[in-house]
């Protein structure tokens, strides 16, 4: 497997990150990276990174990083079409968990997933996230205790 890293989005990589897309049948499950990056620039608590495999961007994730709260929210995560099912998502989540464990007060990570065909919910559950019983904005909420 390629070496997976979480790298800052820079002026050199922004175009390649913004143009990454999920499969057509998954488009309703995650916002485009360009929208996520725009949101991040107006939210001081957004922490976002390109998911890279051997230095090449293959995905994107964004965390709501509030050091005053025990809950950290995985706001966005996507892997481009053709880059899924290669272990990149699992490794990216492992790296994210390592990062969050260094943050003040962190006790859990929350993520939302739209249920249905192609949903990432089973992926998150295999990783160890557990449904909380809450649904927000049509997304099933899942929690990973740290």
Image (cartoon, rainbow, N blue to C red):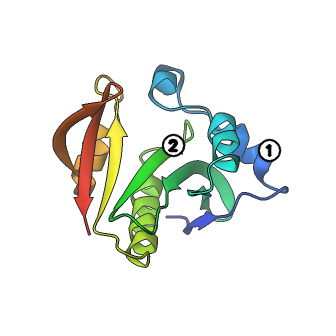
> Which structural element holds mark 1?
helix
Decide if residue 89 is on the left or right side of residue 57: left
Q: Which residue is depicted at the point 61% across and 50% down? A: 58
Closest to the observer, 93 or 53: 93
Decide if residue 34 is on the left or right side of residue 21: right
Closest to the observer, 133 or 92: 133
Residue 16 vertical placement versus 3 (above, below): above
Please tell me which of labels 2 and 1 falls first in the chain.
1
Q: CA distance from mark 2 to mark 1?
A: 16 Å
For residue 36, which numbered disc appears in the image?
Answer: none
Q: Quadrant of the C terminus?
A: bottom left
Closest to the observer, 137 or 116: 137
Residue labelled with disc 2: 78
Q: Which residue is depicted at the point 42% across and 56% down? A: 87
Mark 1 burial class by Cα count in 10 Å: few <14, some 14-19, many 20+: few
Mark 2 burial class by Cα count in 10 Å: few <14, some 14-19, many 20+: many
Name of the residue lying farthest toward the right: 11
> Which structural element holds mark 2?
strand
Decide if residue 140 is on the left or right side of residue 18: left
Q: Could you tell me how many numbered marks the image carries? A: 2
Indicate the position of residue 51 as horizontal and vertical percent values: 58, 57
Q: Which residue is depicted at the point 60% across and 56% down? A: 48
The reply to whether callout 2 and callout 1 are in contact (CB within 8 Å) is no
Residue 50 vertical placement versus 22 (above, below): below
Indicate the position of residue 129 as horizontal and vertical percent values: 24, 53
Residue labelled with disc 1: 15
Name of the residue lying farthest toward the left: 133
Name of the residue lying farthest toward the front: 68
Closest to the observer, 84 or 10: 10
Indicate the position of residue 113 as horizontal and vertical percent values: 34, 36
Indicate the position of residue 44 as horizontal and vertical percent values: 62, 56
């Amino acid at each position: 497997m390629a070496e997976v890293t979480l790298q800052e989005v820079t002026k050199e990589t922004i175009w390649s990150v913004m143009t990454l897309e999920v499969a057509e049948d998954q488009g309703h499950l995650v916002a485009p990276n360009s929208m996520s990056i725009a949101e991040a620039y107006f939210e001081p608590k957004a922490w976002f990174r390109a998911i890279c495999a051997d230095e090449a961007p293959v995905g994107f994730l964004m965390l709501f990083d509030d050091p005053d709260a025990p809950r950290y929210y995985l706001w966005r995560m996507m892997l481009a079409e053709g880059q899924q099912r290669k272990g990149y998502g699992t490794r990216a989540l492992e790296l994210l968990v390592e990062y969050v464990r260094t943050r003040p007060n962190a006790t859990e990570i929350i993520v939302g997933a739209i249920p249905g065909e192609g949903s990432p919910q089973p992926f998150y559950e295999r990783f160890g996230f557990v449904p909380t019983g809450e649904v927000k904005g049509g997304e099933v909420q899942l929690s990973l205790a740290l």
